[in-house]
């Protein structure tokens, strides 16, 4: 579900701070969560009546997330340091230590665990727990007003302040004294990944005891005294400077409205703490969760590629059709030229035949005169065919063999022989066919 609206609430004993934000096209902006309400404000009154009053001012709707921060005095916090291990192993280790870490029975508390990876790879875990009887009335109000599904976080205000500091890119590590609910105060140590230590400063402590306790905490995390700031100017420490880069300039400052601190975990990307009886959860990268987005991206890519290919195929078909039309037009233009080409080939062949005839004509005259001189009288030829150097004669005579013998005596002829059978008519005339080869004449290939 797309989150379109955020509401941050800080509920202290005698006042409620709230701040709303809605998502625009490109960013977030402060917005009114309900009718006849300012985008942010402070509602005076005793808790939890102020919470019920606020939640009744706007109706439940999907796409909204509510983050609720409570004073540090409502929680117990224990810190555990672990060696460099995966977060899943760290979670299992801390859960196994809960019976000895928490001073109250697990059945009497709601708990969650905040994990931070330190710069040297170690894992810092904060076990945050509170009495069920303290938290259940708050959860009941959300359920009775219909906002139970919108509640996305329930945590100490110091964790929200840490998310705000990280999002505003303050120099880390940092120690901060927080005194949002007088006379209680808290010393919190922050790294860029979140809150790594929280100590409630006892009201019965003297000023010297409080200073000694803070010095020991600073020494534990190797922090100089100059890195100790106070959220309020009255905390006896250096006042917290303005943000180096005010990335939440559209929101009030956390000194003016602590609802901004409750809202900050939604922007910082820190682990979200939610004491509602659910088991602790950590963000773990699951490669299989990339499958659906990757499949969607691949589907879109294939769809775009398919459309592009279809356009390319369409353009190709159109180009082929245009080329076919051009080919047909060219063929129509070339048809007269093809007829001219065929006519030229026939003319060339006829010209070659004429050249051969002209080349052989004087020789033929001599050959026919030689044949007429040699054959006996009474012989005549009905047909003559010249193929290259071979001459075929068909005719009739009283003695065909004598004609062959006569022609063989001529120096102009070679290979004189009868072809086929010789037939004799009743009148004694023989019909024959003979072939001879003209000497000194090249044969056609």
Image (tube, rainbow, N blue to C red):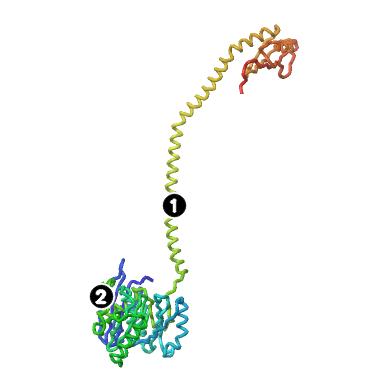
Which quarter shows the N terminus?
A: bottom left
Count of residue discs: 2
- In the image, 386 versus 62, the foreground residue is 386
Q: How crowded is mark 2: few (under 14 residues within 10 Å), some or many (20 or more)?
A: few
Quick check: 342 left or right of 128? right
Per the image, the residue denoted by label 1 is: 309
Q: What number is the disc on residue 242?
A: 2
- Nearer the observer: mark 2 or 1; the answer is 2
Residue 421 horizontal/vertical position (percent): 73, 18
Q: Which residue is farthest bottom?
A: 204
Going from N to C along the chain, the mark reached first, 2 or 1, is: 2
Quadrant housing residue 27: bottom left
Residue 114 horizontal/vertical position (percent): 40, 80
The image shows residue 372, relative to residue 14, as above or below, that is: above
Which quarter shows the C terminus?
A: top right
Q: Is residue 144 visible?
A: no
Q: What number is the disc on residue 442?
A: none
Q: Residues within 10 Å of mark 1 (few under 14, many from 20)?
A: few
- In the image, 315 versus 146, the foreground residue is 315
The image shows residue 4, relative to residue 298, as above or below, that is: below
Quadrant housing residue 433: top right
Q: Can residue 206 be seen in this view?
A: yes
C-alpha span from label 2 to label 1: 57 Å
The residue at 44%/55% (across/down) is: 306
Quick check: 356 left or right of 23? right
What secondary structure is found at the residue carrying circle 2?
loop
Residue 221 horizontal/vertical position (percent): 36, 81
The image shows residue 131, relative to residue 438, as above or below, that is: below
Residue 101 horizontal/vertical position (percent): 43, 87
- In the image, 92 versus 155, the foreground residue is 92
What secondary structure is found at the residue carrying circle 1?
helix
């Amino acid at each position: 579900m797309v989150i379109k609206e955020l509401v941050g609430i800080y509920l202290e004993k005698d006042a409620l701070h709230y701040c709303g934000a809605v998502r625009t096209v490109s960013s977030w902006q402060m917005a009114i969560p309900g009718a006849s309400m300012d985008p942010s404000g402070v509602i005076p009154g005793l808790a939890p009546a102020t919470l019920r009053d606020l939640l009744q001012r706007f109706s439940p709707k999907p796409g909204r997330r509510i983050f609720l921060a409570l004073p540090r005095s409502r929680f117990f916090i224990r810190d555990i340091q672990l060696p460099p291990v995966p977060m899943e192993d760290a979670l299992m280790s801390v859960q196994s230590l809960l019976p000895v870490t928490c001073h109250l029975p697990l059945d009497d508390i709601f708990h969650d665990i905040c994990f931070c990876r330190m710069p040297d790879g170690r894992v810092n875990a904060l076990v945050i727990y509170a009495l069920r009887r303290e938290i259940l009335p708050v959860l009941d109000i959300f359920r009775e007003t219909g906002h139970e599904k919108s509640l996305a976080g329930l945590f100490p205000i110091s964790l929200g302040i840490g998310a705000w500091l990280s999002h505003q890119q303050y120099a880390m590590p940092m120690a901060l004294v927080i005194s949002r609910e007088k006379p209680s105060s808290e010393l919190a140590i922050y790294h860029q990944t979140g809150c790594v230590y929280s100590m409630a400063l006892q009201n019965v402590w003297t000023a010297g005891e409080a200073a000694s306790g803070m010095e020991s905490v600073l020494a534990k995390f190797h922090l100089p005294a100059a890195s100790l700031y106070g959220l309020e100017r009255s905390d006896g420490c250096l006042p917290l400077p303005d943000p180096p880069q005010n990335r939440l300039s559209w929101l009030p400052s956390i000194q003016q409205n602590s609802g901004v601190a409750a809202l900050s975990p939604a922007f910082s990307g820190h682990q979200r703490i939610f004491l509602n009886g659910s088991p602790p959860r950590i963000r773990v990268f699951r490669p299989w969760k990339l499958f659906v987005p990757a499949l969607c991206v691949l589907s879109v890519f294939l769809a775009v590629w398919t459309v592009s290919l279809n356009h390319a195929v369409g353009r190709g078909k159109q180009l082929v059709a245009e080329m076919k039309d051009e080919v047909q037009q060219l063929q129509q233009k070339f048809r007269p030229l093809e007829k001219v080409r065929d006519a030229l080939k026939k003319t060339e062949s006829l010209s070659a035949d004429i050249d051969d005839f002209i080349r052989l004509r004087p020789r033929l005259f001599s050959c026919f005169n030689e044949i007429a001189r040699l054959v006996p009288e009474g012989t005549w030829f009905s047909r003559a065919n010249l193929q290259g150097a071979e001459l075929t004669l068909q005719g009739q005579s009283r003695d065909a063999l004598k004609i062959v013998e006569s022609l063989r005596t001529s120096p102009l002829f070679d290979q004189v022989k009868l072809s086929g059978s010789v037939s004799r008519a009743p009148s004694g005339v023989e019909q024959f066919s003979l072939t001879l080869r003209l000497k000194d004449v090249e044969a056609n290939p």
